[in-house]
Image: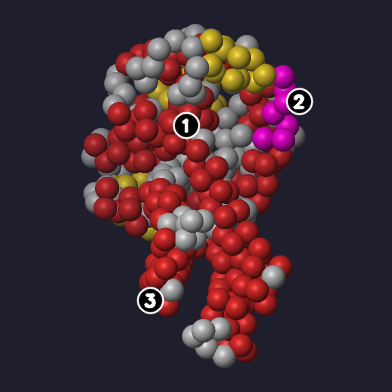
Amino acid sequence: MNILILGATGFIGSVVAARLVADGHVVTGLGRNPGRARLKQPAIDWRRADLSHMTKPADWDDILKDQHVVVNCAGALQDGLSDDLSATQAEAMLALYSAAKRSSRPLVVQISARTAGAASDLPFLATKRRADEALAASGLAYLILRPALVLGRNAHGGSALLRALAAFPLALPLVHAESPVETLSVNDVAEAVSRAVSGGISGDIDLAANEVLTLAELVRLHRHWLGLPPARVFPLPGWLTRPVTWLADLSGLLGWRSPLRSTAMTVMSEGVQSSKSGSSLAATSAVAALSANPSGVQDLWFARLYLLKPLVISGLSGFWLLSGLIPLLALEKTSAHFLPFMAEAAATVLTLATCLTDIALGAAVLLRPLAKRALLGMLAVSFAYLAGASLLEPALWLDPLGPLVKVLPSILLTLTALATLDER
């Protein structure tokens, strides 16, 4: 069969795509940035597209041609610079259904979520519910899958946060530590999609293992999986995490997809459980899912670096912003360093230019779409500063305050940020 997968570069989508290729289907993968996925999975016909710009039926006509199945693995947690939930999770899906009804009328498999509970009115679940209801009423053949918390060899979002929390030294700081959580393996989702494609299942189905763990138990399980010694859980009151949630929401507005945003915290306040009211499929337990994929040292590195990454980015931003702002407070004194080599006016202009460059880089690195270019700019400017200072005033290398020596750890921190910048 010809199968179109939306969000095929994501955590769930990439596994579903691999499974369907293995089943012998012709798979087309849709993603916003499929360049790396094209190298990793060359058997898939990759197409670049942004669902938030595909909100009219005509936008889907060409890509739906000759497709027998559409699998929607795309989704986002919260609105921000990188995501528009209404457009991506609702409007684009309604446009797809309209286009599908006038084309080959493919089977539509929707990877959704439990849309009731404390977060039901938030855009994350409200947009999914709108798309689910429209699909059920569309007259198309469909399957709506509602998986619990998905675990896999890779990690993203909530599963990545679990690993990061599990790697905390000495103690495990948790909010909502006793919240119930159901899990399953990402391979269970791929198996369910495979069965739907072969005509084995349809309708609206919950997907979760037949066990309920507390969040604390799940984090301890991940700690054991990482090969770390047991640690005591340190429960945190909800009010103590509000500043972190506020900062995470702010980062979302700047394009960063933090799993600590308010939507995730609201969902976790009551746990992640299936409704148990509809039909359900058996799934793999958390122990079995983790045991099937033993951890390596790279998993431990990821877990330890995950929560350091935002600190590295914000630390670099602060360093460059201050390095540009502080000299402006004493512009005449700062520009005096250049007077032995150029006229006073030129020295002032050069000082202003370097200060504004530093400020621009410090601000740009906070914006996710500009972060990589900002980090590369930091490296280029740092080496330019070192080269220029070494030529004009080499004695600065021996200055007791180390103005040039201190640039070297900044370069290393910038390289670390570049190495950990990718999200998937």
| Residue 268 to residue 23: above or below | above
Nearer the viewer's eye, disc 1 or disc 3?
3
Q: Nearer the viewer, residue 388 or 83?
A: 388
Q: Which mark is residue 239?
A: 2
The residue that disc 3 covers is: 391
The residue depicted at 62 percent of the width and 60 percent of the height is: 321
The front one of 119 and 21 is: 119
Q: Quadrant of the N terminus?
A: top left
Q: Residue at x 34, y 57 (%)?
A: 35
Residue topped by disc 1: 160
Give the percent coordinates (x, y) of residue 382: 44, 65
Q: Amino acid at mark 1?
A: Ala
> Magenta stretch: residue 242 in it?
yes
Residue 273 lies left or right of residue 249; in this view the side is left
Q: Compare marks 1 and 2 and give the one earlier in the sequence.
A: 1
Identify which residue is drawn at 63% across, 47% down: 251
Magenta-highlighted residues: 237-244
Q: Is residue 122 in sight in this rendering? A: yes
Whether pointer 1 and pointer 2 mark residues with C-beta atoms closer than 8 Å, the reply is no
Image quadrant in which you'd find residue 189? top left
Q: Residues within 10 Å of mark 2 (few under 14, many from 20)?
A: few
Q: Position of residue 353 (x, y in %)?
A: 58, 78
Mark sitting earlier along the chain (3/2): 2
SS for tag 1? helix
Q: Whole-percent x and y of residue 45? A: 30, 54
The amino acid type, in three-letter code, at marker 3 is: Leu
Q: Classify 366 as above or below 285.
A: below
